[in-house]
């Protein structure tokens, strides 16, 4: 039960931090500033829907996709940890990660007829970091040792965490005007730096587990 609780906390925290609903909401506000309320709600609904479909697709089919390209989960876990580490460092220094959205994508998105899919859903909400997280965490859930009901619960945690993160993002986008009025840049940077520190720690944990699994001899195990 303790292991399951730890896995649940890891899953919810890592996915929520990488999706970063607050940052997505601020970008949403900047891209929809000239739209009326009905158009804004449509963009918020479509963006979060496409992001959710993307994350759930990689949650359930990510392992198969890796096998198709001959990529081991250990290699993907280490690479994903490095990616999350970079995102976390960008958050600590109060910068928007280039894995989330480049300046060009933001500029082009302002003139696009449909900004919901690109750049809001991908890569702002369901970016490489979020996709990496759900694949690695789902593989971790499938490798859980324990009773059958514990394995089933672990498998349900990752998609539930993804749904929760996207649901919170949708809620914040729907109430973006109120949130922007109450949260200033100073408060946003402080919260972003704190989440960045947590994400860096999670990234290091991903890397350590990947190295330990790929090279068990380094930890005293047998190859």
Image (cartoon, grey):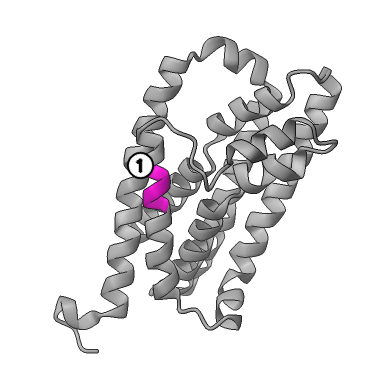
Would you say 142 lies left or right of 103 here?
left
The quadrant where residue 204 appears? bottom left
Instruction: Name which residue lies at 14% across and 81% down.
Output: 220
- Give how far across and how far down residue 103 sits, in percent: 59, 36
**Residues drawn in magenta:** 84-88
Q: Main secondary structure of the magenta part?
A: helix
222 vs 79, left or right, is left
Q: Quadrant of the C terminus?
A: bottom left
Q: Where is residue 130 drawn, in percent x and y? A: 53, 52
Residue name at image x 41 percent, y 52 percent = 84
Q: Is residue 167 visible?
A: no
Out of 170 and 79, give the one closest to the viewer. Answer: 79
202 inside magenta stretch: no
Q: Pick whichever, 31 or 215, lies toward us.
A: 31
Looking at the rendered structure, the secondary structure element under dot 1 is helix
Quadrant holding the N terminus = bottom left
Q: Is residue 206 visible?
A: yes
The percent position of residue 27, horizontal first and vertical second, equals: 62, 29
């Amino acid at each position: 039960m303790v292991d399951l609780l730890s896995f649940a906390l890891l899953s919810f925290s890592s996915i929520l931090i990488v999706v970063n609903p607050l940052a997505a909401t601020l970008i949403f506000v900047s891209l929809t500033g000239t739209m009326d309320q009905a158009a804004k709600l449509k963009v918020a609904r479509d963006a979060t829907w496409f992001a959710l479909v993307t994350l759930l697709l990689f949650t359930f089919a990510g392992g198969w996709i890796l096998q198709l390209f001959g990529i081991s989960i250990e290699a993907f876990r280490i690479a994903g940890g490095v990616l999350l580490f970079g995102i976390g460092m960008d958050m600590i220094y109060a910068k928007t990660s280039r894995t989330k959205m480049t300046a060009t994508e933001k500029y082009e998105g302002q003139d696009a007829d449909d900004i919901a899919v690109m750049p809001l859903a991908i890569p702002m909400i369901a970016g490489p970091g979020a996709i990496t997280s759900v694949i690695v965490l789902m593989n971790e859930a499938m490798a859980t040792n324990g009773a059958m009901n514990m394995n089933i619960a672990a498998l349900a945690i990752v998609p539930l965490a993804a749904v929760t993160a996207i649901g919170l993002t949708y809620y914040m986008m729907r109430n973006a005007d109120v949130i922007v009025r109450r949260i200033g840049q100073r408060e946003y940077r402080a919260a972003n730096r704190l989440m960045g520190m947590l994400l860096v720690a999670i990234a290091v944990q991903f890397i350590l587990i990947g190295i330990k699994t790929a090279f068990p001899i380094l930890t005293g195990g047998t190859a």
